[in-house]
Structures are given as C-alpha cells and as structure tokens.
Amino acid sequence: MEITPANESDIPDLCKLLNILFTQEIDFQPDMEAQSRGLARIIGNPETGLILVAREDSQALGMVNLLWTVSTALGERVALLEDMVVAPEARGTGVGSQILQQAIQYAKDHGCKRITLLTDRANTEAQRFYQKHGFDFSAMIPLRRAL
C-alpha cells in the first residue's frame, strides 16, 4: 500500500470515498459536484490543507483530509481532521490506522499542536478507533449555523 498526497486526478476516486462517508453520516448528504469543488480547492491550495490517499494497485482504499488553522488558545498552528474514510472492503486491514498515523505525523512535522475532529455521536466504532489512536473526548460541543 502507498500513502501519498492527493492530486487532481484523484478527485473522482475521492468523491466515491466521500459518498460512502456522507451516506453513513447523519448531518451530510453526498453531492459529487460539491465534493469535487471542495477537494479541488484543498488540493490546489496547500495553505488550506492536505488530503492523503491510500492506494493499492492504483485503487483508492482510503483518505484523510486535514485543514490548517491557528488556535488562539495555543497560539500555534492546529489541524482539523475534516474527513476520514476507508472503503468498506479495506476496513479491518490496517489501512485506516496507517493513513491516520501518517496524517498525525505530517501535522506534527508541520508545526501543528493539536488535531480536532468530529464524529457522529452514534458512531461508537469510529470513536473507539480514534481513542485507540490517542484522541480524547472534549468537554466542548459543536454548534453549527448554515450560511
């Protein structure tokens, strides 16, 4: 398996992975046009973030999307783990752990002092996965306003 930064030619495969993710998340709906637009904006602007893609024999097995921002609480750069998904046929094979570990290392190597992520409240399997990789629950709760 190979894990590398995504490029524009990966967008169709990444949209397929996001379709899987957004089908299982309560708050979101798949929209290939919107996902293509968002992926292109991130891939085309490294100052915005990084998308890593795990491939085997040119097939995209998983992806993770990190977005950069600055924490005023820390006075340092931090990352938001916006999307992470592994294709159903690759789950349980270590792909998710490998791609997440590489994303964490990349964030550390590029000065990030924290990674924050959201997951569905009901997705206890994902919560256990992230806890296994050193993520803890926060006392904060997310609020959202659509604009």
Image (cartoon, grey):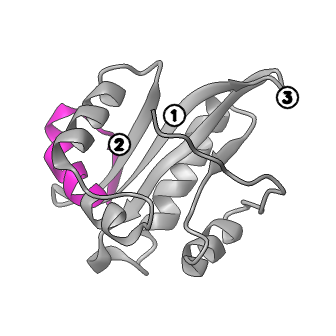
Label 1 to label 3: alpha-carbon separation = 18 Å
Is 39 left, or right, of 59 in this rendering?
right
Q: Secondary structure at mark 1?
A: strand
The answer to whether 134 is drawn above or below residue 71 in the figure is below
Q: Determine whether label 2 and label 1 are within 8 Å by CB.
A: no
Q: Quadrant of the C terminus?
A: top left
Give the amino acid type for the residue marked by disc 1 in the picture. Leu
Quickly name the residue at label 3: 73
- Image location (x, y in percent) of residue 106: 56, 38
Q: Determine whether label 1 and label 3 are within 8 Å by CB.
A: no
The answer to whether 8 is drawn above or below residue 46 in the figure is below
Q: Which residues are magenta?
A: 1-18
Q: Is residue 10 visible?
A: no
Label 2 to label 1: alpha-carbon separation = 16 Å
Q: Residue shown at 65%/48% (left/top)?
A: 143
- Image location (x, y in percent) of residue 130: 63, 66
Label located before the other in sequence (3 or 2): 2
Q: Which mark is residue 67?
A: 1
Label located before the other in sequence (2 or 1): 2
Quickly name the residue at label 2: 4
Is 25 left, or right, of 87 in this rendering?
right
Q: Residue shown at 66%/44% (left/top)?
A: 115
Residue 139 lies within the magenta run: no
Q: Quadrant of residue 44?
A: top left
Q: Determine whether label 3 and label 2 are within 8 Å by CB.
A: no
- Image location (x, y in percent) of residue 55: 26, 56
Give the amino acid type for the residue marked by disc 3 in the picture. Ala
Label located before the other in sequence (1 or 3): 1
